Amino acid sequence: MRIWGLGVDELHRAFWASHGVSVAVLGDGRAPDPDADLFLLVEPGQFVAFDLRSIAESLLWSRAGLISVAIRDETPGGYRESVVLDAAGRVVRVERHYGGESGIIGEILLARRIDDARAWSEASTVESAEARMRAARHRESATCPGKRYVANDRESAAAFLRDIVRRWSHPDRVLVGVSQIDDGVFARTGAVRRDGDRFVGPLWIGDRDPDGVRPLVAIGPGFVADEVAESAVPASLSPIREIFSPKSERGIRWRPGRGGLYAPAKRLIDIVFASVALALASPVLLCCAIAVVVDDGFPVFFGHVRQKQGGTTFRCWKLRTMRRDAEARLAEYQRQNLCDGPQVLIRDDPRITRIGRLLRKFQLDEFPQFWNVILGDMSIVGPRPSPEKENQFCPAWREIRLSVRPGVTGLWQVMRTRAPGLDFQEWIKYDIEYVERMSPWLDAWIVWQTVVNILRDLRKGAAQPGGEPGARLGVLPGAQQEGRPERQENTT
């Protein structure tokens, strides 16, 4: 099975080269690329695919020269999609269900030093390789979701190719002689489409028989293997130096975020900021907790189940501001919902307790979310976390917003207009814009604008005694009313 004259092993090397990683195969004697950021050490006949960004922080902070990566099966632990139909057979929505942790299906090594990668490729056994590798005595471990494939199993090799077709959006930036002939569809440069050909990407079209006349209909994610003899001149793999040269369209190397240090720096700032905020606010939070109990009894905190990066769930904590029977009373007030999307927002919501209104007015109910930040479930800035059933309403938006940590505040919270019928659309728009533009400067601007909005909102509230500030409907740290999932202590 070949595509563009390349075997699956060469395509495996090309896929990792697109991330700035050079593959070293045990005992093959092939020299690793000296310009690689990392070296992937695998045994013969082993292919792997996973997202390095999921362990990028560990890689950046680790001082170990060798990292042992346990690959956790991402199929049961990842997701499954299903189409929900109504009684008439019409499509209502597409749901993606995320599962829990699953078993380890394989292990690979990541090396930082080219000497260790050379030792691996020149050795005949794992034991002899590790005896020659300087970093073998000092290694660290990491776990990430991914896939492991076996080369001598045709079905497994085909599954690997389908997987990298789905994950790898621009093979033409790495493989010389390959071009994009349609949206997400790649073939040999100069390949001629025949009458009747119909392609839906992501799709790779291998070398076709020049004497053939039959049209091809193919739908991705997938591939069409070469039809011609294996003697066809194969596409060539560009050196990593050329792939990531200033003159080329850069691929996605393993370095996370913008400029490489953005992700770990953002995480460090999150921890410091959240720790200081909780320490300074602890006396006030204690008073608030007592007030909640006096007003409506226990519990003091409410943890709403939301989805975080990767689609796994966590409890987003806040001080309880709703009555304990709020969920049961939702249907009673559903017609008063002001939101156009899956959220719920009821003006002067009768389910909110007396102390709850005060906590919301001064944003105090959101402070426990800084504990989520310290735990790593959330960041200070990012798309607001939402429950799974809200994320189902727009699959593309869901995948984008679940690619980063959710935030205590975000771009939507400071940019939304609350225009009738547009709130959900703005939510999607600004979440996507943040993920595409995220940077230290944008994060700093969002935090500043959040503070400005809160102060302005409080001034309006002071001028309107007895009522919640109107501007609060779009302000943050959770004032962010994704229907105010925060309002969703017991509901969405």
Image: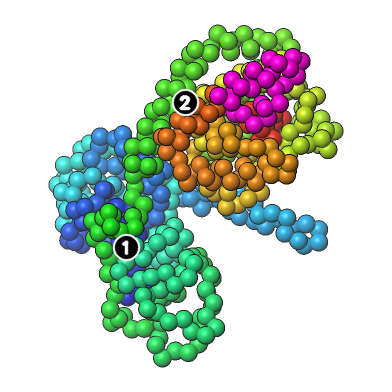
Image mark for residue 174: 1
Q: Residue at x 34, y 62 (%)?
A: 173
| Mark 2 lies on residue | 374
Disc on the earlier residue, 2 or 1? 1
Is residue 461 one of those drawn in magenta?
yes
State the image quarter where residue 409 is shown.
top right
Front in this rendered view, residue 251 or 271: 251
Bounds of the magenta segment = 452-478
State the image quarter where residue 27 is shown.
bottom left
Q: Is 283 situated above or below 461? A: above
Is 256 placed left or right of 329 in the picture? left
Callout 1 crowding tier (Cα within 10 Å): few <14, some 14–19, many ≥20: many
Colour treatment of the image: rainbow
Front in this rendered view, residue 434 or 491: 434
Q: Is 255 situated above or below 447? A: below
x and y, in percent, of residue 401 in the image: 54, 44
